[in-house]
Amino acid sequence: MREIYKNYVNNEHNFDKSRWIGIFCLIIVMGGIFGFVYEYIFYYFNGGMKASYWRGGNFLPWINIYAYGGLIVYYLTYKLRKSPLKVFMLSLVSCGILELISGWALDQVGIRYWNYNIEILNFGNIGGYICLRSILFFGLSGLFFIYVMVPFAFYLARIMSKKAFMILSISLCAIFLFDELYNLLFAKILSTPTAYEVYSKIGINYMKWLKTNYYKLDFVYNMNWGNMVKEQYETNRLILRKFKNEDVIIIYNSWNNPKNYRYNEIPKGITDVSNIVNFSWPNNGLYFFVIELKSTHEAIGTCRTGKWYFAKDNEKIWDFGYNIFRSDDKSEYSIEDIKNAFNSDIISKDEKYWGKGYATELLKELIAIAKSEGIDELKGDCSILNYGSAKVMINCGMTFDKFDLAKCSAYFSLNLNQNMSAEETSNNWKSYIEDNKKLVKTNSQLIKDNSKKHYEKATNIFNNKV
């Protein structure tokens, strides 16, 4: 082995064009596999050593960005292989830039594949895209790559016959790349199951990354606050308990009710719901509960609370969300259901669990949980037109902060270290209604357009699901 290493470092390597192609194919394969192994191990510890998760988006253990990084490291450092320090520094800088640019660019189109804000050992973190730990790892990985994996590829290229080496390297690369293309493109075109859907179905803990501000199925175990949340709480009439496997269907039916599309942009697929149910304690620092009636143990809704997505590491800020089930929740919905939902009043007279104060009772309990965990501030938001949710938040002492016309949303917050008087709460509500009416009146067309976008998006998603 030592001779192989010396030969690799000290001598020039004059392979023919075909063998160089084979070497690059092996670099792509080994780089992606190396990245998978690293993430598999790291996120096992990041999750408190409670479970392991399949990383990447493919059937095979391979992650594309590490393959690209391997090629970059090879091109930049191969000729400098006699100087490990230069290899280390160039690997650190080049892969760090790749990660920073890739993370930022993806985030601009609403996708977040990693977020160092919510991981362990995230010192030197910049926007969640990059941190000191990650780039130090890239530097060390560059050394391992240049002085172990590349020499191994050279060794195979030298000892194997040209035909055997080309068959091995190109076949392996083709298999991994086809797996990548299938899950990114072909599965959608052919309407066939992706790796995520298959692995989730057979019980493998598969890591599915969703869009920015949606729940990414990842675990965090490094918070020194908010880590004592119990699996069940009780109020006068309600029980908040951890999700169970048997909850999947009723949650799916409710979250996909077209009436919810008016306020919540994206209906979730059964696999998304299943993963949140199975891997939600905590899910990115979030805690999901099913809401039950204490008298009958009947499930009447869902809620979640936990770390606010935009909170910095040292900020003890949580947010929350809830969904009270509707009387017409069902397993299948039609285009007609979507039309009716957007053309009728959002709350009908036959709503079984609405208008009974459950949401207010629930939010008061979520506030109590946040206080018990030492949280400083609680945030919430709702559609500009969702007056019911706005009133629930204000009645529970939350303060109206601002409107966001681009998202047609209203934002609220509660300083958990202060209490608002009944008079202040009443004035807050009156002020909110007055400001809201002015906003809706002067921006009625924008709000109508936003509702239309929700309708079109819901219809498109529904058509793709059929």
Image (cartoon, grey):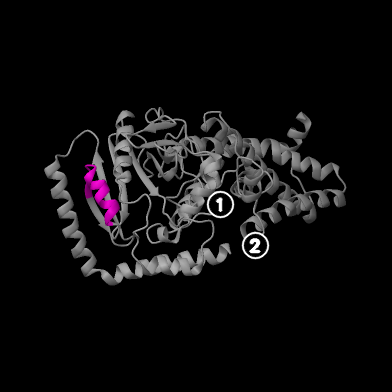
Residue at mark 1: 270
Left or right, residue 174 beside residue 335: right
Q: Amino acid at mark 1?
A: Ile
- Going from the N terminus, do you reach mark 2 or mark 1 first? 2
Q: Nearer the viewer, mark 2 or mark 1?
A: 1
Query: Residue 228 placed where, x, y %?
Result: 40, 27
Check whether the beta carbons of the residues at disc 2 and disc 1 lie within 8 A of each other.
Answer: no
Q: What residue span does the magenta drawing correspond to?
A: 387-400
Compared to residue 94, the image places residue 451 above or below, namely: below
Q: Tell me where residue 240 appears, x and y as whole percent.
A: 40, 36
Q: Residue at x 26, y 44 (%)?
A: 413
What's the mark number on residue 400?
none
Q: Is residue 37 left or right of residue 116?
A: right
Give the alpha-carbon distance from disc 2 to disc 1, as whole Å.
Answer: 15 Å
| Residue 399 is one of the magenta-drawn residues | yes
Quadrant (top left, top right, bottom left, bottom right) of the N terminus: top right
Q: Amino acid at mark 2?
A: Ser
- Residue shown at 32%/45% (left/top)? 359
Q: Residue at x 79, y 40 (%)?
A: 155
Q: Could you classify mark 2 by the number of other residues whose Cα lies within 10 Å: few (under 14), some (14-19), or many (20 or more)?
A: few
Residue 29 point in image, percent of width and height: 70, 47
Is residue 296 visible in the rendered structure shown here? yes
Q: Which residue is mark 2?
A: 191
Q: For the residue labelled by badge 1, is the local secondary structure a helix, a strand or a loop? A: helix
The residue sitting at 16% across, 45% down in the picture is: 425
Disc 2 on helix, strand or loop?
A: loop
Q: Main secondary structure of the magenta part?
A: helix
